[in-house]
Image (cartoon, rainbow, N blue to C red):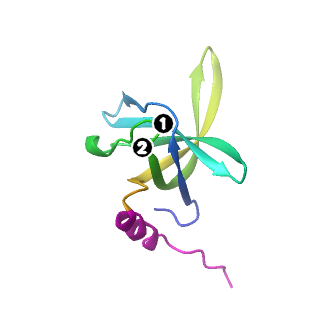
Amino acid sequence: MNENNLVVLRGRVSAEPTLRELASGALVAQFDLTVAEGTTTASVPVAWIDPPAARIPAIDQAVVVLGSVRRRFFRAGGTTQSRTEVVADHVVGANRRREVERLLAAVPLFTPAG
């Protein structure tokens, strides 16, 4: 976990996660997380590499995601495109309170240089 690029999100899975196999043989689960921002919501794309099959979230499930932000580039339609997403290290059901507390307790806190 990179303490300089750290994301903690709580939200609901807004669409059925899709699974695909990478050229390396790794499996990636991709899903959108709807996160409340005051009176509005935002949709955040999440990619989880090699998730345990039993832990892949279901649509409308409330989860806590711990990971980092990544911008990846790819070719589509003859042009280079990009996508900014959260790469999850951990995804925990928000109703699993003790597990969420342990996860958050392990998050390195920001310490200003000086």
Q: Nearer the viewer, residue 112 or 62?
A: 62
- Would residue 104 be counted in the magenta stretch? yes
Q: Which residue is mark 1?
A: 31
For the record, the magenta segment spans 97-114
- Does 45 sit left or right of 38 as displayed? left
**Residue type (three-letter) at the residue carrying disc 2:** Trp
Q: Provide the secondary structure element on which disc 2 rests.
A: strand
State the residue at coordinates (52%, 36%): 14
State the separation of the CA atoms marked 2 and 1. 9 Å
Q: Which residue is mark 2?
A: 48
State the residue at coordinates (40%, 36%): 29
- Would residue 49 be counted in the magenta stretch? no
Q: Provide the secondary structure element on which disc 1 rests.
A: strand
The numbered disc on residue 59 is none
Q: Dot 2, how many residues are within 10 Å of its Cα: few (below 14), some (14-19), or many (20+)?
A: many
Where is residue 16 shown, x and y percent of the image?
Answer: 44, 30
State the residue at coordinates (56%, 57%): 7
Q: Is there CB contact under 8 Å for labels 2 and 1?
A: yes
Where is residue 77 shown, x and y percent of the image?
Answer: 61, 14
Q: Nearer the viewer, residue 95 or 55?
A: 95
State the residue at coordinates (42%, 69%): 101
Q: Quadrant of residue 94?
A: bottom left
On the rendered image, what quadrant is the C terminus found in?
bottom right
